[in-house]
Image (cartoon, rainbow, N blue to C red):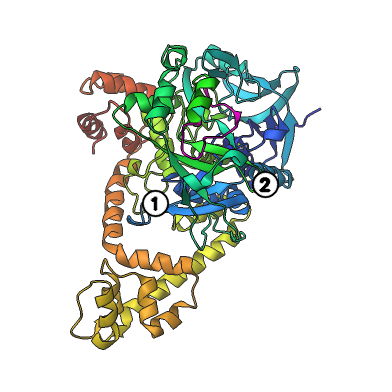
C-alpha cells in the first residue's frame, strides 16, 4: 500500500511541518502522518509568532529555507519589533497571526510539495530492528516503512486535560491523546517524564468593551520575518491591554481548593516564564494587578485570546473573574482555559543532531524534548528534518554551533544540560548575542543552506550577496565622506550631541550614541540621496556594523578562543571512568552523554573547569 519513505514525520504541528519541509527540500521522499488533517500547523495556544529571542529563531529558520517566516508574513495581522529602546542584539520581531489563515497557508505549502505524502491516522508504535528504526505502525495495524523517523508528538503523548476537578484524555481541546509510543520507548530503555502547559479562555470579541482598554497598535510601516519577497502588511489589526485587580484575584482564590495545580493532581512542571493566572497571584501575592493582552485570533473571527490569563481553575471561577476585568464586564466565554499534562523524554538522551542515542535513525523534535513554544518546536523540526535527510544520503550531519545561531544554543542546552521544566529561549541564554541578531540571520545561515543543497537556497544567496555588498558600500562611503561643522552642527544640537569644530568623517559622527542613520540622512541631503539607492534592510545592517564594530570584533575573538575547545575531539568509546582525577559526577555525566568535543563536555551540567583541565592534560593539550 505504501512505498518505502526516506523520512516519516509523526505529528503535523510546527515541528512536524518544518521537519517534513526540510527533508523534502533536500530531495527526500517524506510521509507526514497526523491524527487530523484539519489541524495541520494548528496554533494551539497564542495566535502569534516571534517575540524576544523567538523572533530571532523564526528568522534563522527562514534563512535555512524553512517556511515558518513565509507563512507568518502571508497571514499576520499585526507586526511589532520588540526592544527597540535597547541595542540591536535585543531587537526581536513579533507578529500577531490569523490563526485559521496560518494553518491553511501551511497546509497549502505542504501540499504543493511533490516530495511530501500524507496519512491521517494515529501512529501508536515504531518498527525497530537491531537497534535501528525501520518505520511506524498505525492504530489500524498498518505498517509504513521508512529509513528514518522523526517524532514530533507535541502535547499528545498520553495527554491529560485538567479543568478544575475535571480531567479527561486529550492532546488539546476537542482532540484525543496519542497512546502506545511512550510505552514502547520506555520498553526500549528511554527515560520518560511529565510536563504541563496551559492555555487561557477564549472570549467573544463582540462582548468586549475595548474603550475601557489601552490600544496596542502595530509598527508603521510593518516589518516582516522572511528574507524572501513576501507581501507587505498594509492593514493591521490592533491588540489591547487591560489589567486584573484585587477583586479578580479574590474570586480566583475561591477556586484554589479545586485547582489541579494546588491539590496535587498535576504532577508535571509548567513553564516558569508563562505561569497560569492562579500561579501568578499565589507567587506574587503582593501585586494588586497583572497585565493582560487582549489579542484577536484573526481578521474574520470574533474569537479573542486573553494572553496572561492561562488557567486550569473551574470554568465558573474563570467566568466570574473575567467579568471583573475592565472591558470584560459583559464578556461571553467561548471555552474555558485548561492545563494539559503530557509525556516528554529528557533531551540528554539525544545527540546534537537530535537523533536518539538508543535507536539509530530515530529523531525527536519539539515538545517531546521538553521545550515550549511554536518557534522552539519549529527550529528543532527543521534540524531533525535536515539531519534525517543527511542520514539517508549518508552525508555528514549538520550541527550548528552556539556562536552560529540561537538554534545551536537551544539544541546544545537541551542535549548537554537537559531540562526539567518547559524550556523557552531567551536572548540571555546566548553568549554571543551581538553576533546572533535577527537582522543578520541570512548572512549567518543561508550559505549553510546552499552548501547542503536546500531547494531555493541559490536564489536566497543572491540576495545575501547583494546585502553584504550594499552594506560594505555604505560603510565605505561613511569612512571616506567628510562633513563640515556648518553642515552638521545644527543637527547635532537637535539631538543633544556636542558640536564639531572642524571637518570630520561621517563614520565618526554615526558612532555617537545620539545619532542614527535615518535622522542624519534627513539632515544631510547628499547622504540622503546616496542612501535612497539601497533597501532599508541593507542600510540598517551597515549602521549596526559601524556602530557596534568594536563589540562585534570582541565577540568574534571570544568565539575563536572557545572554538579551540570545540576543535579538540573526544572518541565515542572514551573510558571516562578510568580517569580517577575526574570528579565522580563528571565521570558519570561524561560516560552517559559521550560528548564529541571538549567544548561540548565543558557545557554538561556537573562537569567543572577542573574536570575540563584533566581531560585536556590527558589528551596532551
Q: Which residue is mark 1?
A: 436
Instruction: State which quadrant residue 42 falls in.
Output: top right
Numbered circle sitting on residue 268? none
Residue in view at x 35 percent, y 33 percent: 570
Residue at 28% from the left image edge and 23% from the top image edge: 586
Q: Is residue 57 magenta?
A: no
Frontmost residue, 122 versus 212: 212
- Local crowd size for mark 2, using a 10 Å CA cut-off: few (<14), some (14–19), many (≥20): few
Q: What is the x, y in percent for residue 463?
A: 54, 65
Observer-side mark, 2 or 1, equals 2
Instruction: Say which quarter of the image contains residue 384.
Output: top right
Q: Is residue 48 visible?
A: no
Instruction: Give the magenta range.
Output: 323-339
Q: Is residue 100 left or right of residue 193?
A: right
Residue 37 falls in image quadrant: top right
Q: Residue at x 60, y 18 (%)?
A: 181
Q: Which residue is mark 2?
A: 300
* Residue 303 image position (x, y, % from top left): 62, 39
The answer to whether one can see residue 337 in this image is: yes
Q: Farthest right residue?
A: 1
Relative placement, left or right, of 435 versus 107 is left
Q: Is residue 216 above or below residue 143?
A: below
Separation of marks 2 and 1 at Cα, in angstroms: 36 Å
Measured as percent of width and height from the top left, residue 440 is found at 44, 57
Question: Residue 346: x, y in percent?
Answer: 44, 23
Question: Which quadrant: the N terminus?
Answer: top right
Amino acid at each position: 500500500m505504501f512505498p518505502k519513505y526516506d523520512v516519516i514525520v509523526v505529528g503535523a504541528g510546527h515541528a512536524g511541518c518544518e521537519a517534513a519541509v526540510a527533508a523534502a527540500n533536500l530531495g527526500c521522499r517524506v510521509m507526514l502522518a497526523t491524527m487530523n488533517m484539519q489541524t495541520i500547523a494548528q496554533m494551539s495556544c497564542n495566535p502569534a509568532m516571534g517575540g524576544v529571542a523567538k523572533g530571532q529563531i523564526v528568522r534563522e529558520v527562514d534563512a535555512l529555507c524553512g517556511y515558518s517566516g513565509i507563512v507568518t508574513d502571508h497571514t499576520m495581522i499585526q507586526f511589532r519589533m520588540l526592544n527597540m529602546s535597547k541595542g540591536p542584539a535585543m531587537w526581536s520581531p513579533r507578529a500577531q497571526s490569523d490563526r485559521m489563515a496560518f494553518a491553511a497557508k501551511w497546509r497549502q505549502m505542504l501540499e504543493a510539495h511533490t516530495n511530501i505524502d500524507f496519512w491521517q491516522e494515529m501512529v501508536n508504535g515504531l518498527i525497530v530492528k537491531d537497534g535501528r528504526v525501520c518505520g511506524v505502525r498505525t492504530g489500524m495495524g498498518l505498517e509504513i516503512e521508512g529509513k528514518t523517523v522523526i517524532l514530533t508528538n507535541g502535547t499528545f503523548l498520553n495527554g491529560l486535560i485538567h479543568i478544575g476537578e475535571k480531567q479527561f484524555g486529550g492532546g488539546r481541546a476537542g482532540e484525543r491523546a496519542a497512546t502506545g509510543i511512550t510505552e514502547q520507548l520506555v520498553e526500549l530503555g528511554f527515560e520518560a517524564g511529565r510536563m504541563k502547559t496551559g492555555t487561557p479562555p477564549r472570549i467573544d470579541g463582540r462582548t468586549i468593551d475595548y474603550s475601557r482598554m489601552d490600544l496596542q497598535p502595530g509598527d508603521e510601516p510593518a516589518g516582516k520575518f522572511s528574507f524572501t519577497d513576501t507581501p507587505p502588511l498594509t492593514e493591521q489589526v490592533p491588540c489591547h491591554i487591560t489589567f486584573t485587580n484585587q477583586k479578580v484575584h479574590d474570586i480566583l482564590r475561591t477556586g484554589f481548593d479545586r485547582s489541579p495545580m494546588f491539590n496535587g493532581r498535576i504532577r508535571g512542571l509548567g513553564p516558569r516564564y508563562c505561569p497560569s493566572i492562579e500561579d501568578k497571584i499565589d507567587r506574587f501575592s503582593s501585586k494588586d494587578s497583572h497585565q493582560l493582552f487582549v489579542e484577536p485570533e484573526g481578521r474574520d473571527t470574533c474569537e479573542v485570546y486573553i494572553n496572561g490569563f492561562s488557567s486550569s481553575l473551574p470554568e465558573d471561577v474563570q467566568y466570574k473573574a473575567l467579568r471583573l476585568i475592565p472591558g470584560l464586564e459583559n464578556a461571553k466565554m467561548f471555552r474555558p482555559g485548561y492545563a494539559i499534562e503530557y509525556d516528554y523524554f529528557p533531551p540528554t538522551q539525544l545527540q546534537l543532531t537530535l537523533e536518539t542515542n538508543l535507536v539509530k535513525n530515530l529523531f525527536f523534535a519539539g515538545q517531546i524534548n521538553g521545550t515550549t513554544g511554536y518557534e522552539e518546536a519549529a527550529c528543532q523540526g527543521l534540524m531533525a528534518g535536515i539531519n534525517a535527510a543527511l542520514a539517508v544520503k549518508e552525508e555528514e550531519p549538520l550541527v550548528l554551533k552556539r556562536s552560529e545561531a540561537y538554534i545551536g544554543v537551544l539544541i546544545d542546552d537541551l542535549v548537554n544540560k537537559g531540562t526539567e521544566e518547559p524550556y523557552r529561549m531567551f536572548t540571555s541564554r546566548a553568549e554571543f548575542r551581538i553576533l546572533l541578531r535577527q537582522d543578520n540571520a541570512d548572512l549567518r545561515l543561508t550559505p549553510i543552506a546552499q552548501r547542503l543543497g536546500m531547494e531555493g537556497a541559490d536564489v536566497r544567496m543572491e540576495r545575501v550577496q547583494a546585502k553584504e555588498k550594499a552594506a560594505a558600500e555604505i560603510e565605505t562611503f561613511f569612512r571616506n565622506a567628510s562633513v563640515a561643522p556648518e553642515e552638521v552642527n545644527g543637527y547635532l544640537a537637535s539631538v543633544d550631541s556636542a558640536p564639531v569644530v572642524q571637518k570630520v568623517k561621517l563614520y565618526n559622527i554615526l558612532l555617537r550614541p545620539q545619532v542614527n542613520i535615518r535622522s542624519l540622512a534627513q539632515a544631510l541631503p547628499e547622504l540622503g540621496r546616496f542612501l535612497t539607492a539601497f533597501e532599508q534592510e541593507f542600510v540598517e545592517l551597515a549602521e549596526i556594523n559601524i556602530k557596534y564594530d568594536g563589540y562585534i570584533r570582541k565577540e568574534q575573538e571570544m568565539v575563536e578562543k572557545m572554538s579551540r575547545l570545540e576543535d579538540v575531539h573526544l572518541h565515542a568509546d572514551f573510558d571516562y571512568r578510568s580517569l580517577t582525577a575526574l570528579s565522580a559526577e563528571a565521570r558519570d555525566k561524561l560516560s552517559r552523554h559521550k560528548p564529541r568535543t571538549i567544548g561540548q563536555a565543558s557545557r554538561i551540567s556537573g562537569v567543572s573547569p577542573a574536570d575540563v583541565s584533566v581531560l585536556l592534560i590527558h589528551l596532551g593539550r
